[in-house]
Amino acid sequence: MLTSFMERIKQITDTWVSFLLQSAAKFGNELTKEGREDQRLWRQQRLRDLHFTPSKPVTTKRQKIVILGGGSGGLVAATQLGSNLGKDHDVILIDRRSQHIFMPAFLFLMVGQRQPKDIVRNLKRLEQRNVQVIQSEIEGIDPKRQQVLLDSGPIFYDYLIISLGMRTAPELLPGFAEAAQHSWELEATLRLRETLESFEEGRILVGVPPGPYRCPPAPYEAQWMLDSYFHQRGMRDKVKIEFFTPAPEPAGEDRTPAVWMDRQSKKRGIQQHYSFSVQSIDAQRKVVKALYGFELPYDLLFLVPPHQPSQVLLDSSLVETGSGIRVDYDTLVTRWGNVYCIGDCADMPVSKSGGVAHQQAEVVAHNLTVELTGEGEPTTLRLHTL
Ligand SMILES: Cc1cc2nc3c(=O)[nH]c(=O)nc-3n(C[C@H](O)[C@H](O)[C@H](O)COP(=O)(O)OP(=O)(O)OC[C@H]3O[C@@H](n4cnc5c(N)ncnc54)[C@H](O)[C@@H]3O)c2cc1C
């Protein structure tokens, strides 16, 4: 049974790949109107092949759609589902915070180009889109009973969208709490900003730990923003900036992103240390220690904290890998047919970024709308940003 299922999947994939190759050959990069229509029909067929059938018949009964997390993914899903379905069904968003925090702006906050009030919004504003907002810690998720446990008790759902992000886990790296600063949380960013304002001279080490973390390009941007920041303050010559990453030294054409970033950093006089896999920090000696005995000294250490899936996902045994919950890459559905997972807590071979979370949320919101209204066609995730 499993073998024939796998063969079927392989057959579908092979046909799909060959179709894409044929389309590319036929239409070049610019698809004609007919080419786009062909692709649309093929995608619909593929969804049917992948058993994308509504998990329930279209119903007039009021359904409860619960969205966990009011970050980038949850916010987009709630906005769209509230607008599409909120009058006929219950759309509920739950987060421990009362506010959405727009994390991509943390680097601007770090260098004083944004204030906290610029990057937070009250989640209650979603009520204008027919979304009920509950502020609560989520203590458990039980897909078998179709319920989420809050501090006030359990809440039942018909459909669940999990967008609980990743948790920063400084405790996973010995010495991090005493020695390192970062901009991966709001409070930490404000502390780093104060440190930078009083920094007069010395070596700033910007680093990346092993393992997944939110927004892979952000530490690269951070080193350039620090470079500009100290130039603007007229003291760049007093500050040495260095960067380390466990990734190997990039190779290839200049337009390969990693090569381009390496060149940009070097142009700015920022030394790059590759294959540097941090293991611990010695706060007293002010050195970062890596595999194979490598060490780097610092005066100010700006290190991305290690990340883990949200604690409640670990406690509820929903995550199978350190990167999150397994999902179908096309539809974001999990192994429980009425549970979807999007954003940083979905285990997918893409960067953990708000842009990806946004696009995933749109697909899930669209498909649930189709499922509950019976109108339109289901779609699949086709990322335009990785
Ligand atoms: C410095 C920095 C720069 C970035 N730059 C970019 C960028 O330029 N472009 C880009 O696309 N992305 C960027 N990102 C990444 C982006 O912010 C995240 O990938 C995105 O926010 C992920 O969305 P999400 O919905 O998966 O999770 P999150 O936005 O992390 O939301 C998760 C929500 O779940 C809530 N939550 C978690 N656990 C519980 C619980 N047990 N109970 C109740 N509530 C809970 C949290 O309070 C949070 O509101 C950046 C991130 C950082 C830190």
Image (cartoon, rainbow, N blue to C red):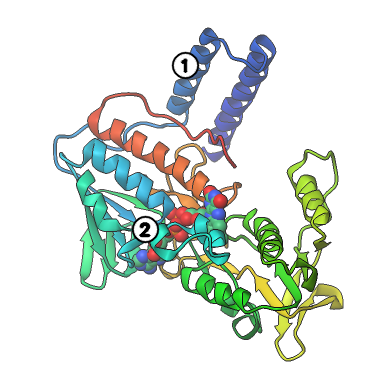
Q: Is residue 144 left or right of residue 300?
A: left
Q: Are marks 2 and 1 in contact (CB under 8 Å)?
A: no
The residue under label 1 is which amino acid type? Answer: Leu
Quick one: label 2, few (<14), some, or many (20+) residues within 10 Å? many
Tell me if I can see residue 324 in this picture: no
Which mark is drawn over residue 41?
A: 1
Q: Earlier in the sequence, mark 2 or mark 1?
A: 1
Kind of residue at disc 2: Gly
Which circle, 2 or 1, is nearer the viewer? 2
The residue closer to the viewer here, 34 or 43, is 34
| Residue 210 horizontal/vertical position (percent) | 69, 65
Q: Is mark 1 within 8 Å of ligand 1?
A: no
Q: Nearer the viewer, residue 206 or 59?
A: 206
Q: Position of residue 378 (x, y in %)?
A: 38, 28
- Residue assigned mark 2: 69
Q: Quadrant of residue 315?
A: bottom left
Look at the picture and state if 336 lies above or below 153. Answer: above
Q: Quadrant of the C terminus?
A: top right
Say whether mark 2 is within 8 Å of ligand 1: yes
Vertical side of 72 occupied by 235: above or below? below
Q: Measure the alpha-carbon separation of dots 2 and 1.
A: 34 Å
Q: Quadrant of residue 170?
A: bottom right
Q: Is residue 25 above or below residue 205?
A: above
Residue at x 75%, y 49% (from the top left corner): 261
Number of marks present in the image shown: 2
Percent x, y of residue 219: 66, 60
Element on which disc 2 rests: loop
41 or 70: which is nearer to us? Answer: 70
From the top left corner, tell me how far across and down residue 162 is, in percent. Answer: 39, 54
Q: Which type of secondary structure does the marked residue at label 1 adopt? A: helix
